[in-house]
Amino acid sequence: MKIEVDLHTHSNYTAHAYSTIYENVMYAVKRGLKGIGVTDHGPNFEDGGHIWHFHNLKDLPKVAEGVHLFRGIEANLLNPDGKMDTEFVKPHKLDYIIASYHGPFEGIITKEDLENAYLNAMDNPQVKVLGHIDRGFFEVDFEKIIKKAKEKNIAVELNKHSLELDDTYRGRVIKIAKICNDLKAPVVVNSDAHFCTDVGNVENIFELLEQLDFDCSLIINTSFERTLKFIGGEQ
Ligand SMILES: [Zn+2]
Ligand SMILES: [Zn+2]
């Protein structure tokens, strides 16, 4: 099992990532990917991308070296109302938003605040992916969040980096995968690459899913065509 599109990659427009978009594309070619999401951190993260980066994503070609480029942002959840740092960019300039939490931000203090931030952000029609919901100081009610994600046809991310962080995060990823499997919720498997050699590198997630006897038909981004439709808003 492999992915055809990696919907979560960082370029060096994020200060703590180290490769250009073109280098990411070249590793996508090496791994046989058909597409990548260019999803640098939103500007409210200390080392997130400059707003002009997002305004000007239209200048990226749709396809480079045979790899489709999806124009995205890994937005920061800022408060329990689901506000994100995307308001500065007109919706038509982005193909999709990954809603992620990289706190602490002043507006999100408690577990309930973070749950509400996820739940309310999903009412934004451009949110197509919930990024690494395993992260944070507290464990949110995964089931509540995944139920709404399914209702809204938003994919829950299984993130390669989370598995590598420590046993707490690994445990949370396992819980998330099991709940998605039980609820038959849509999932994407992403690298969250911060260096080009990691683009499309998600073997550890597939090893885990095999152990869990996971229903792989729930994974959107193993198919380029399915991903294209999904990002375009189709079921
Ligand atoms: Zn993130
Ligand atoms: Zn990321």
Image (cartoon, rainbow, N blue to C red):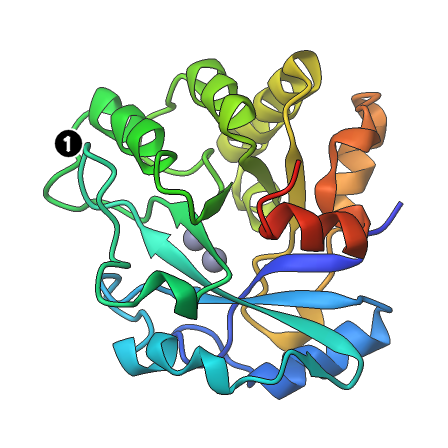
Relative placement, left or right, of 160 versus 125 is right
Where the C terminus falls, by quadrant? top right
Could you tell me how many numbered marks the image carries? 1
Q: Position of residue 230 (x, y in %)?
A: 64, 46
Q: Quadrant of residue 73?
A: bottom left
Q: Position of residue 51 (x, y in %)?
A: 27, 76
Q: Tag 1's secondary structure?
A: loop
Q: Position of residue 210 (x, y in %)?
A: 85, 30
Indicate the amino acid at tag 1.
Answer: Ile
Where the N terminus falls, by quadrant? top right
Q: Residues within 10 Å of mark 1 (few under 14, many from 20)?
A: some
Looking at the image, which is closer to me, 168 or 53? Answer: 53
Relative placement, left or right, of 96 versus 229 is left
Residue drawn at (19%, 25%) of the image = 110
- Examine the rendering and report whether any part of residue 9 can be seen: yes
Q: Which residue is mark 1?
A: 109
Looking at the image, which is closer to me, 121 or 47? Answer: 121
